[in-house]
Image (spheres, helix red, strand yellow):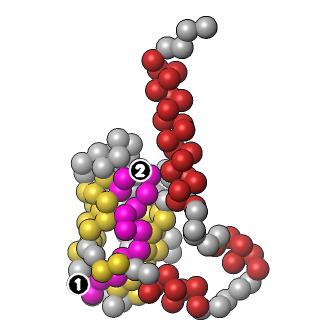
Amino acid sequence: MKKTPAIIIGTVVVVIALVAIVAASSGKKNTTDTAMSGNTDSSSTSASTSNAVAADKVTIANYMFGPADIKVKVGTTVTWTNTDSVKHNIVSDDNMMPDGKLIGKGEAYTYTFTKSGTYKYHCSPHPYMHGSVVVE
């Protein structure tokens, strides 16, 4: 049976997505397990905070936010730029910032952080994509 180019491309896209899922989930703590176990230890929060990179730009590539965790000062405008060929967005986990619209390749979403706190977010079409902004 001869495979059409569309089938081959579709298979490659699926494989790349699966690799991205595995890469994104490796080394990350399962927050569902923490919530289910009732663990309220704040050390996990401070650990993720200390791993945040001081930056105001996040690149969306290979179905991941990079860097996933950043640290900024109050008043900083953060820019997320999509380099993937599929659309992504920035959606607040706890409504601390407005949800961004889907952005295509080469497009960007910006938000200015006016209050301190930890802002966790994800991509709604790809919920395994997570990130956070720590504002001091």
Q: Is residue 98 above or below residue 134?
A: above
- Can you name the residue that lies furthest to the top here? 1
The residue type indicated by label 1 comes to Gly
Residue 67, percent across and down? 37, 68
Disc 2 designates what residue? 62
The image quadrant of residue 1 is top right
Magenta run includes residue 115: no
Residue located at (48% from left, 65% from top) = 130
Disc 1 designates what residue? 75
Residue 26, percent across and down? 58, 63
Most common secondary structure along the magenta stretch: strand
Residue 31 visible to the viewer = yes
The residue type indicated by label 2 comes to Asn
Which residues are drawn in magenta?
A: 60-73
Residue located at (49% from left, 56% from top) = 124
* N-terminal-most mark, 1 or 2: 2
Left or right relative to 19: residue 98: left
